[in-house]
Amino acid sequence: MRVRTAILLLLHLAVLSLLAASTSSLADGQQAAAARHRRWHVLLREKATLLALKRALTLPPAALPDWNESNGHVCSFTGVTCDWRREHVVGLALPNMRISGAIPPVVGELSRLRSLDLSNNSISGAIPSALGNLSRLRNLNLSENSISGAIPPSIANLTRLENLIVYKNVLSGDIPPSIGNLTRLYELDMWSNNLTGRIPAELSNLRGLGVLQLDNNQLGGAIPPSLAMLSRMYYLNLQHNNLSGPIPAAIFLNCSILGVIDLGNNNLSGEIPSAASGTLADSFAALNLYSNRLTGKLPRWLANCTYLMEIDVENNWLDDELPTSIVSGKKNLTYLHLSNNKNFRSHDNNSNLEPFFAALSNCSWLQEVEAGAVGMGGQLPGRLGSMLPRNMWHLNLELNAIRGPIPASIGDIINMTLMNLSSNQLNGTIPTSLCRLPSLERLVLSNNFFTGEIPACIGNATHLGELDLSGNALSGAIPSSIGGLAELNYLSLQRNRLSGPIPPGLISRHANLLLLDLSSNRLTGAIPEEVAGIAKMTLNLSRNRLGGKLPRGLSNMLVQTIDLSWNNLTGAIFAGLGDCVELAVLDLSHNSLAGSLPASLGRLQNLESLDVSNNSLTGEIPLSLTKCNMLEHLNLSYNDLSGVVPATGPFVNFSFLSYLGNRRLCGPVVRRGCGTPRHKRAWYQSRKFLVVLCACSAALAFALTILCAVGVRKIRERLAAVREDMFRGRRRGGGGSSPVMKYKFPRITYRELVEATEEFSADRLVGTGSYGRVYRGALRDGTMVAVKVLQLQSGNSTKSFNRECQVLKRIRHRNLMRIVTACSLPDFKALVLPFMANGSLERCLHAAELSLVQRVNICSDVAEGMAYLHHHSPVKVIHCDLKPSNILINDDLDRLKRYLGGDTTATFASSLGFSSTTFEDID
């Protein structure tokens, strides 16, 4: 019985266990099914979100073909990354897909997203605030798009963000200070946007930040000193902003692993911090502080930086010696830019360059040395080619005081691409070793004292694109080998002593030639017709001895400037020049061109300057020129043009100076009537009326003659009395300054000045300056005068001229040139001054015409005149340009006249252009 009971009990327990297990298995199955349902639902929701994202954006037709409803699983979408269980979308990367449109807020529903990369597309619009919902986001890259607007404050919600990259967009506004809450941030890239305001001091909370790039924005204010708390930062780039103030010294002390600091192109001032962390010696690689206002010296701690690669401090106010100790032994140094500073002197009182170049000999990776305009002096070492590494390709030492020859060893730097030694004191001949540089692309040796001929082997530098040898004393012919430089773009040989013809082939092989300047030489022969083969060029062959006719090939060029002035060209200006539709400047002055101005010039809609003066042109001024609306400068003077001067279009801005020496031109601007056409006689043209008119005119003329005679006599008596008073005043003043007297300046008309200067003819022109021309003239009473005709260039010229006259009439001293009178019209201003036949003191000094006594007297007279100006004149004048060319000698070489010209502190003198060249050429 007990056994049966036990068996039944066991069976009962087994049944209960089976029932319990069955129930538990059923529950687990139900939970698993529910979980799978939830995951599937999440994926479906994220799939719908991605499809909505695709619909909101604009994509190329074939982009993202697998993003559709029929695709079974969202994790197989292009650019989509799911977690390892394939339960959630955690990554979305669609770079370089040519996507456009704005980012829709729906992207904020991808709540498990850890990385979002939409870089290098054409996305526009603003950053949606909904991005702040992606609380698990670690990497956000929206760079290289066209995203605009401000950075939304909701970005601060992304507390797990490690990389925030939004460079190369058009974001604007301030950087939100709340970005300081992103304490896990390692890289912050916001460069090349339009961000304004200050750099938030809250960025110092980003203690793990390694890269901070805010360059190429419009940020202002000072660099926050708190950035020094970013002890793990190794890359700091704040260049191309409007930052001001000093560089915080603590950055170099506390940022102990700093490798690159780029603060160039700002308004920073003060000195470069002279102290730095000792650990920087193992990490610091680049110091870029160019284009600021920094003063002082280069910090000496740079000498300890073993891995230094870049030093760029050009365009500052640094005053130091060449950094020989800093660059010595820096094998990794690649770029050394020191140009445009106050001073980087060479050794031994700025006379020894060898230690500096010797220090560079161990810089085996050195590629660029920029040390132009730093005041360095001395000679280039003879071993220069062996001192500089063979990998160097860029050497710029322009605008210094380097003297002596170029060493022949320069040809050993076989990778040299750019060499600029212009504006120094180099002399000797150009070394032929330069021809051994096969990679040379730019050779600039202008404004030195080189002599001899241009090496014929220069044609061996087949990659040469720019050759500038201007401003030297080179002689001989232009080598024909230059014609073989097929890649030549710029050829400048002006201001030398080159002679002979322009060699054949010099132009024809250079299809890409942009500048050809052979001006101010002694070239002869005709201009080659092959110029027609050039499409775009600035052509300057002025101030030579070229002859022949204008090459008709000029009409086939898209040239912008043609200057053939001061040559011996003959023939006519051909109509084809009107086909140079890009022409802005045309100067054919001072030649022997004949014929008429072609009407086709009116087609030059870009023409800004036209000068055909001093030729033998005839005919009328083409009315088509009134259509050249860009024309600002016109000079047709000293030809034989006739007819009416146009008065419309740009011609309303030109004064009579544009037409001087053309006696047959007429119109209001030249003050010469054009007459009226013949027509039927009116009553006032009858013979009887004319007889009566002549009789009345004769009687009136007789009466006026008597009145004028009486008036002239009284005027002469008054002038004699004035002279006597002035003489007595001088006697009382002891030969020094005399009191200012009332002096009536004679009136003079424009017509009298025209007669006195023979209509301002070229024969009467004795000097030109920046602000006008000076003519020698003879008044009706035989008085020789100098007439200075002022060039009216601004709206204040009349006011300045009047102020000038008011001051000059109040100044009286025997050693100061007096003003005879003035002539003022709305478009004509002139000063009439005594003519000094002996010219300036400069001419007398160089000609050795003065005795010792005369020289002493001149010094005394100059001192008296200057003392009067400074202390005794009713109007205090400080003369800032005292030199022999501004001191004029009168006829008897006994009294000195000091012209109140040149640069003075009075604004009226400079505004009207009384420069030192005013009477420079008077004999």
Image: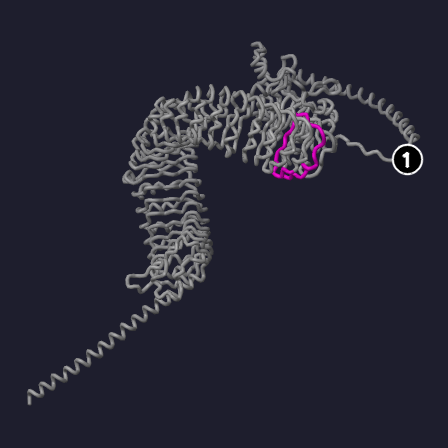
Q: Total label count?
A: 1
The residue at the point 68 percent across, 18 percent down is 729
Q: Is residue 804 visible?
A: no
In this rendering, the answer to whether 8 lies above or below 635 is below
Q: Quadrant of residue 570?
A: top right
Q: Residue furthest left?
A: 2
Q: Is residue 771 magenta?
A: no
In this rendering, the answer to whether 762 lies above or below 561 is above
In the rendered view, how is the structure colored?
A: one colour
In this picture, residue 784 sits left or right of residue 108: right
Judging depth in this view, the residue of 171 and 551 nearest the camera is 551
Instruction: Residue 72 in the image: state x and y as whole percent.
Output: 35, 66
Judging depth in this view, the residue of 95 and 292 nearest the camera is 95
Judging depth in this view, the residue of 313 and 712 nearest the camera is 313
Q: Residues within 10 Å of mark 1 (few under 14, many from 20)?
A: few
Instruction: Residue 899 in the image: state x and y as whole percent.
Output: 62, 22
Q: Amino acid at mark 1?
A: Trp
Instruction: Residue 114 in the image: state x and y as whole percent.
Output: 34, 58
Judging depth in this view, the residue of 460 and 6 nearest the camera is 460
Q: Which residues are magenta?
A: 603-630
Provide the secondary structure element on which disc 1 rests: helix
In this rendering, the answer to whether 139 lies above or below 323 is below
The residue at the point 63 percent across, 12 percent down is 894
Instruction: Residue 738 in the image: state x and y as whole percent.
Output: 65, 20
In this picture, residue 93 sits left or right of residue 484: left
In this picture, residue 845 sits left or right of residue 640: left
Q: Which residue is mark 1?
A: 683
Q: Residue furthest bottom?
A: 1
